[in-house]
């Protein structure tokens, strides 16, 4: 079954302590050093106060009650309650402080991951499904937060407390202490065994959760397809698989969890019994005071819980290490596409585009484009045609530098695009996307993409150019109408118009058009959009991926791709006369397109 899911790094187990990771994590804590020092001081005070209580009780019993006196009792009670109040305040401060630090670290990491994602090449997103990346930013970061706010300090606190109590017990009465320590290894052994089982459970939990997230994301985004193909039952089954996996993992964790507490309680009972029996005998023999015995029993209560807590925190730590490792691994993925150190500036662009012996593969030597060369002169409009999978979209992706070519050079105005900053390049080369991605924002901002350098007036002009003004004015709040996620409340044609207006508003010297973009609108809208596209291309260099005749006849010349090779160039008429690849494509694809069905996109 597993093959159906996976990504190995959801499986990272993590050691509870990994120096490399800890050092790196410590870097995130550095800005909070004063606060951390404060937290540690508070902690020490808490532990000191915590160990005082039983001593007070011993004093009250041995030098007051056993002597039949009560004169100092009010003072002792006062101190006892005072300590309680102080502990209350200290614990409150401690929790606040550590949670604050944890939250700040979480925020910093979240921002860092997000910034990193934005810098990554598109190939990174081909490799990493959305749900998985989302899991990193949410679950993994939250686990880290937990370890900062609860783990680190609590572990230190519990360790110190256990040690302090162990010493106090020895000081109180070493024979009693030894009687108790005899039983300790058994407890530690059992707790460790349980903790190990719990850890496996936690790992399973995480793995299944990541699977569920990834699956959910795909399914929710693809709901229309799921419903169209009646995949609901099958997909439900698949979801159910994952959900059952999570259930099993959860139950396993709970099973261990539920045995933990009774185990500790049982141990407590056994040791209390032992101490009571042995200690009680010694009290009767008068070799031990009653106060010492009571104090001893009280310390024991405080001794077991930290041990239990420790094993719990240990798990948290282990989880956090695994989460950190996954987060850091992601952060360490190099940006595959980097700007040159000293990028050349593109100021005034004429719009010459050249592909010079370009070879490209998405994966290793699996060539998608082979030795492609062509020159487009400023202002020329060129169509790229070819059967599905020929490499048309790839060509556009390369020109925008979403991927880097393996061999050869792509040049704009005779400057290799690798010498430009990506920002600069994409300012001059704009693409009308196949699937216009609209954001949850107003129409106005969807056109200028929150670029305040573009005035409202320019936006309106751009919209007028592509003929979007009319429909926008009919929207409830006109330019300020807020669009739903991905523009769900607009028709396909309307989305196209906004996408076109977007390109027009940014006024690039080179436009790339995915003609298939308009493949799903009615003929009238199609005509309308074609006209808008023509207007956008006016006075600019343009490459169009054409699937239809009307666009092709408009262009200056045509590039024919066949299995990643440039096989023919020429005008529509010239290419038809050659009666070769283009002619064949034309016969096959465009003839049927005319009849109403369109070629694959
Ligand atoms: N992200 C990717 N990772 C790996 N291979 C890819 C990727 N995108 C495309 N390919 C492969 O590259 C080849 C060319 O794909 P491309 O999308 O450029 O074709 P196309 O000419 O645009 O086809 P269509 O007309 O169907 O849109 C195909 O064999 C495809 O399987
Ligand atoms: Mg394509």
Image: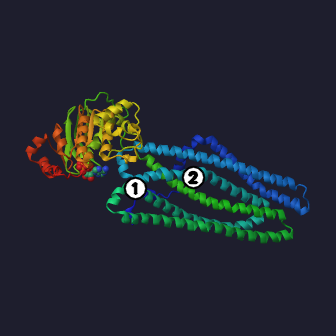
| Nearest the eye: 446 or 34 | 446
Across and down, in percent, residue 272 comes to 74, 68
Across and down, in percent, residue 130 comes to 40, 52
| Nearest the eye: 581 or 420 | 581
Rendering quarter of residue 215 = bottom left
Question: Residue tagged by mark 1?
Answer: 220
CA gap, disc 1 and disc 2: 29 Å
The image shows residue 348, relative to residue 257, as above or below, that is: above
Across and down, in percent, residue 335 comes to 39, 43
| Nearest the eye: 474 or 426 | 474
**Does residue 504 appear left or right of residue 209 in this picture?**
left
Query: Along the polypeptide, which appears first: circle 1 or circle 2?
Result: 2
* Residue 368 in view: no
The answer to whether the beta carbon of the residue marked 1 is less than 8 Å from any atom of ligand 1 is: no
Across and down, in percent, residue 33 comes to 61, 42
SS category of the residue bearing label 1:
helix
Q: Image quadrant for the N terminus?
A: bottom left
Question: Residue tagged by mark 2?
Answer: 146
SS category of the residue bearing label 2:
helix
Residue that protrudes farthest toward the top in the picture: 348
The colour scheme is rainbow
Rendering quarter of residue 566 = top left
Determine the residue positioned at 38% across, 39% down: 443
CA neighbours of label 2 inside 10 A, class few (<14), some (14 to 19), many (20+): many
Rendering quarter of residue 271 = bottom right
């Amino acid at each position: 079954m597993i093959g159906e899911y996976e990504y190995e790094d959801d499986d990272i187990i993590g050691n509870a302590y990994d120096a490399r990771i800890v050092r790196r994590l410590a870097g995130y804590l550095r800005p909070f050093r004063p606060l951390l020092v404060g937290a540690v001081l508070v902690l020490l005070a808490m532990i000191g106060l915590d160990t005082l209580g039983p001593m007070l009780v011993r004093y009250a019993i041995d030098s007051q009650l056993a002597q039949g006196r009560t004169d100092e009792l009010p003072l002792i009670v006062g101190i006892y309650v005072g300590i309680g109040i102080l502990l209350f305040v200290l614990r409150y401060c401690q929790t606040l402080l550590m949670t604050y630090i944890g939250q700040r670290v979480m925020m910093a990491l979240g921002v860092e991951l997000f910034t990193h994602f934005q810098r990554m090449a598109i190939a990174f997103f081909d490799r990493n499904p959305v749900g998985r990346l989302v899991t990193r930013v949410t679950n993994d970061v939250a686990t880290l937060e937990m370890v900062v706010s609860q783990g680190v300090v609590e572990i230190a606190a519990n360790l110190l407390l256990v040690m302090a109590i162990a010493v106090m017990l020895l000081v109180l009465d070493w024979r009693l202490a030894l009687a108790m320590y005899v039983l300790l290894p058994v407890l530690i052994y059992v707790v460790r065994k349980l903790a190990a089982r719990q850890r496996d459970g936690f790992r399973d939990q995480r793995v299944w959760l990541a699977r569920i997230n990834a699956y959910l994301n795909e399914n929710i985004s693809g709901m229309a397809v799921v419903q169209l193909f009646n995949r609901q039952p099958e997909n439900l089954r698949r979801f159910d698989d994952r959900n059952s996996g999570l259930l099993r993992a959860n139950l396993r964790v709970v099973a261990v969890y539920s045995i933990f507490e009774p185990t500790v309680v049982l141990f407590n009972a056994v040791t209390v019994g032992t101490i009571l029996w042995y200690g009680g005998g010694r009290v009767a023999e008068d070799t031990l005071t009653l106060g010492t015995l009571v104090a001893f029993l009280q310390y024991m209560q405080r001794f077991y819980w930290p041990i239990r807590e420790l094993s719990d925190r240990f798990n948290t730590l282990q989880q956090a290490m695994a989460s950190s490792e996954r987060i850091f691994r992601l952060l360490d993925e190099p940006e595959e596409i980097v700007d040159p150190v000293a990028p050349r500036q593109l100021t005034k662009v004429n719009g010459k585009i050249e592909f010079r012996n370009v070879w490209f593969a998405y994966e290793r030597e699996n060539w998608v484009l082979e030795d492609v060369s062509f020159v487009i002169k400023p202002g020329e409009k060129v169509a790229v045609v070819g059967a599905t999978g020929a490499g048309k979209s790839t060509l556009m992706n390369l020109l925008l530098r979403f991927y880097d070519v393996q061999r050869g050079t792509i040049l704009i105005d005779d400057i290799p695009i690798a010498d430009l900053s990506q920002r600069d390049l994409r300012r001059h080369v704009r693409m009308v996307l196949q699937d216009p991605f609209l954001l949850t924002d107003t129409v106005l901002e969807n056109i200028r993409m929150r670029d305040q350098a573009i005035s409202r007036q320019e936006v309106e002009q751009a919209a007028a150019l592509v003929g979007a003004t009319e429909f926008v004015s009919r929207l409830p709040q006109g330019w300020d109408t807020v669009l739903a996620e991905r523009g769900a409340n607009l028709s396909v044609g309307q989305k196209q118009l906004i996408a076109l207006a977007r390109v027009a508003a940014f006024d690039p010297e080179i436009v790339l058009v995915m003609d298939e973009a308009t493949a799903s609108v009615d003929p009238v809208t199609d005509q309308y959009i074609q006209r808008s596209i023509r207007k956008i291309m006016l006075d600019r260099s343009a490459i169009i991926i054409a699937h239809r005749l009307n666009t092709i006849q408009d262009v200056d010349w045509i590039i024919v791709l066949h299995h990643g090779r440039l096989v023919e160039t020429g005008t529509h008429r010239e290419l038809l006369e050659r009666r070769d690849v283009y002619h064949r494509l034309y016969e096959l694809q465009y003839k049927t397109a005319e009849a109403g069905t369109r070629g694959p996109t």
